[in-house]
Amino acid sequence: MAKRTSPRAAPPQAHPAAWILKTEPGVFSFADLMAARERTTAWEGVRNYQARNFLRAMRRGDPVLIYHSSAEPPGIAGRAEVVREAYPDPTQFDAGQASHDPRSRPSDPTWSAVDVRGIEPLARFLPLDELKADPALATLGVCQRGSRLSVHPVQAGEWRAILALAKRKSRS
DNA sequence: GCCAACGTTGGC
DNA sequence: GCCAACGTTGGC
């Protein structure tokens, strides 16, 4: 007899429409990404398991939003895309790096990196207070109180709302 | 610079 | 396995 799916089983999670990556612009900004060779950089140094798992779920071509944290104001600066899926983050094995992890073994690396390529700035910078003011973005990771995750998924409705918001006031 | 929120660590 | 202490993040 075919096994029934438990009614309690969560529905298969749709692949996110996009991802948000946080960066401190004083360290590495969206402009730095656009100025990088081939507008591409390795997104390294993520040291949180949940964020790492999101990195590992990213697929080549997935849209990415670059968010500036610890900035004045904080907010979304531009669009990018995933150009290389998760691979072992080399900085975990480099004792000279702040993100060095002496417990990680090359035979079973703990941490992952992806490569992202900058596409273009948003039509205008979207400050966090505007994101928080949009009801369609109430569930967005960066709008959550106390959210410190540096990588999170963006659902389709959120993605549309962000692009619409960026277009809206730029004309006024 | 403050402090709330949250993840990690380590003693038990 | 619990949970207090500690460190970090990040908005304000």
Image (tube, coloured by chain):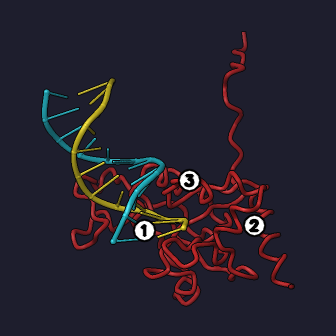
Chain colours: A red, B cyan, C yellow
Identified at 45% across, 61% down, the residue is A87
Which residue is denoted by mark 3 in the rendering?
A145
Identified at 79% across, 63% down, the residue is A161
Q: Which element is circle 2 on? A: helix
Quarter of the image with the C terminus of chain A is: bottom right
Q: Is residue A5 visible?
A: no
Q: In the displayed structure, does residue A34 sit left or right of residue A50?
A: right
Which residue is denoted by mark 2 in the rendering?
A162
Q: Nearer the viewer, mark 1 or mark 3?
A: 3
Examine the rendered structure and indicate whether residue A65 appears above or below residue A86.
below
- Residues indicated by labels 3 and 2 sit on the same polypeptide chain: yes
Distance from the alpha carbon under mark 1 to that under mark 2: 25 Å
Q: Which element is circle 3 on? A: loop
Residue A44 image point, x, y percent? 42, 68
Quarter of the image with the N terminus of chain A is: top right
Residue A111 image point, x, y percent? 39, 56
- The answer to which of A136 and C4 lies nearer the viewer is C4
